Amino acid sequence: MAPERLDATFAALADPTRRAILARLARGEASVKELAEPFAMTQPAISKHLKVLERAGLVERGKDAQRRPCRLVAEPMRDAAGWLGDYRRFWTESYDRLEDLLADE
C-alpha cells in the first residue's frame, strides 16, 4: 500500500464520527440524510466527513436518480489491517521471547 494512501486511511479513521459512518455503511448503503440522523450535526457537516472518507477511498457515492447513496469500500481498511498485522507479529514474538525468558528463571 502506498504511504499516502495509508496516511489517508488512518487520518480518516482517526475521527469517531467517521468511524461511526463507516460502521453504519457496513450494514448497507445510505443517503447523507440517513447518515446524519444519529448525529447532532448538519448534513453539510456530515458531507465534509464523507469527503474525507471518499479521499481515503473508504466511501463511494453512487447516483440513483435524485438519490446519491453512499457505500463502504473496505479495501483500504484491509490494507491498513495488513500493515498493522506486521506489528502484531512483532509484539507476539516479543511476548513469546519474554515468556520463554521468564519460564527459564
Image (cartoon, rainbow, N blue to C red):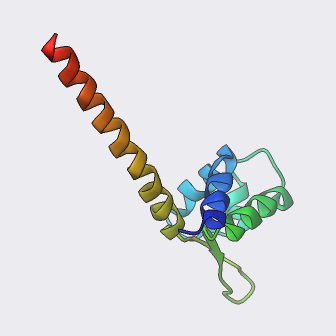
Q: Residue at x 63, y 76 (%)?
A: 60
x and y, in percent, of residue 82 in the image: 42, 58
Nearest to the observer: residue 13 or residue 2: 2
Q: Is residue 3 above or below residue 14?
A: below
Q: Is residue 11 above or below residue 63?
A: above
Q: Residue at x 45, y 55 (%)?
A: 81
x and y, in percent, of residue 95 in the image: 30, 29
Q: Residue at x 22, y 23 (%)?
A: 99
Q: Residue at x 73, y 56 (%)?
A: 36
Q: Is residue 41 above or below residue 34?
A: above
Nearest to the observer: residue 92 or residue 60: 92
Horizontal side of 77 relative to 88 (left or right) equals right
Horizontal side of 69 relative to 85 (left or right) equals right
Rendered image quadrant of residue 29: bottom right
Toward the top, the furthest residue is 105
x and y, in percent, of residue 78 in the image: 45, 63
x and y, in percent, of residue 98 in the image: 27, 23
Horizontal side of 80 relative to 9 (left or right) equals left
Nearest to the observer: residue 53 or residue 99: 99
Horizontal side of 65 relative to 98 (left or right) equals right
